[in-house]
Structure formats: C-alpha cells, structure tokens
Amino acid sequence: MAEMGFFDKVYAVAIQIPFGRVTSYGAIAKYLGAAKSARMVGWAMNASHNMEDVPAHRVVNKKGLLTGKHHFEGTNLMQQLLESEGVEVVDNQIQQLDVIFWDPQVELPEYLGDNL
C-alpha cells in the first residue's frame, strides 16, 4: 500500500470533525506529528474545495478566526456553513471556541500513521 501524502492525512483527520464543532490548523498538524506545519494544513484545506466530503469550513486558526474564508466562494460562505451547523460567528471569529473546539489529540485514537 502506498504511503499517504501529507494533504491526504490532513483530509483523513478533517473528515472526522463532527457537525457543529471546529478545530485549528495547528491542532491537525500537531496530531499528525508535524506541529510546525499549521500553514501546510491551511494549504491542504485550500486545495480541498473540490472535495465535498472534506469540511474545510470547520478548520480555523488557533484564536477561532475564519482566516480561510477568502478561499470560499461568496463573501460569507464559510461563516454561513458554520452558522448552519449552529456555530456562532461574530466579526469573523468563532464564539465559545473552548466549548466547541474539537481536538484530534483527544478525540481520535493515538496517531496511526499511514493507517488513518
């Protein structure tokens, strides 16, 4: 079996984010054992827009800011998708981030490497 590329590993984590929850680029990077690669996770999210099963709108920066919103079609699509899941967004920032934050380090089993 071929080794998964980094973007594929990011997508494998992102599709696990539950409806109404969000995580950060850095949390995904840390889970994948590449803690300093949050920006690369962002690039993966940007490249995922033609992949319907990857909920890129659920990945925000560590402060809960919708930093990737300009990569979505329409002016407020990222916010609208989040709000349709019950996530409150004010001034491009997730409200109650500590309550709805989904941490793959906690929520997923220990990193399984290429067996994701």
Image (spheres, rainbow, N blue to C red):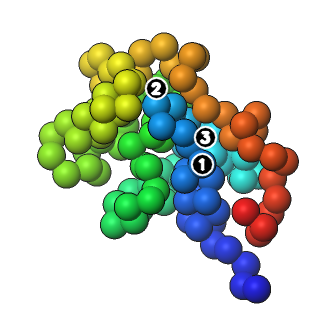
Q: Quadrant of residue 12?
A: bottom right
Using residue 74 as the reference point, say whether residue 114 is left or right of it.
right
* Amino acid on which the number 1 mark rests in the picture: Gln
* Amino acid on which the number 2 mark rests in the picture: Gly
Residue at x 40%, y 65% (from the top left corner): 51
| Image coords of residue 34 (percent x, y) | 71, 52
Disc 2 + disc 1, Cβ < 8 Å: no
- Front disc: 1 or 3: 1
Q: From mark 2 to mark 1, how far is it between C-alphas?
A: 18 Å
Disc 3 + disc 2, Cβ < 8 Å: no
Q: Which residue is mark 2?
A: 64
* Amino acid on which the number 3 mark rests in the picture: Gly
| Image coords of residue 24 (percent x, y) | 55, 37
Q: Secondary structure at mark 1?
A: loop
The answer to which of marks 3 and 2 sits earlier in the sequence is 3
Quadrant in the picture for the N terminus: bottom right
Q: Residues within 10 Å of mark 2 (few under 14, many from 20)?
A: many
Q: Secondary structure at mark 2?
A: loop
The answer to which of marks 2 and 1 sits earlier in the sequence is 1
Asked if one can make out residue 110 in the rendered structure from this viewpoint, the answer is yes
Residue at x 39%, y 43% (from the top left corner): 57
Using residue 83 as the reference point, say whether residue 36 is left or right of it.
right
Up/down of 94 relative to 44, above or below: above
Using residue 32 as the reference point, say whether residue 89 is left or right of it.
left
The one of 28 and 34 positioned closer to us in this rendering: 28
| Image coords of residue 36 (percent x, y) | 66, 47
**For residue 16, which numbered disc appears in the image?**
1
Asked if one can make out residue 37 in the rendered structure from this viewpoint, the answer is no
**For residue 100, which numbered disc appears in the image?**
none
Q: Residue furthest left?
A: 74
Q: Which residue is mark 3?
A: 26
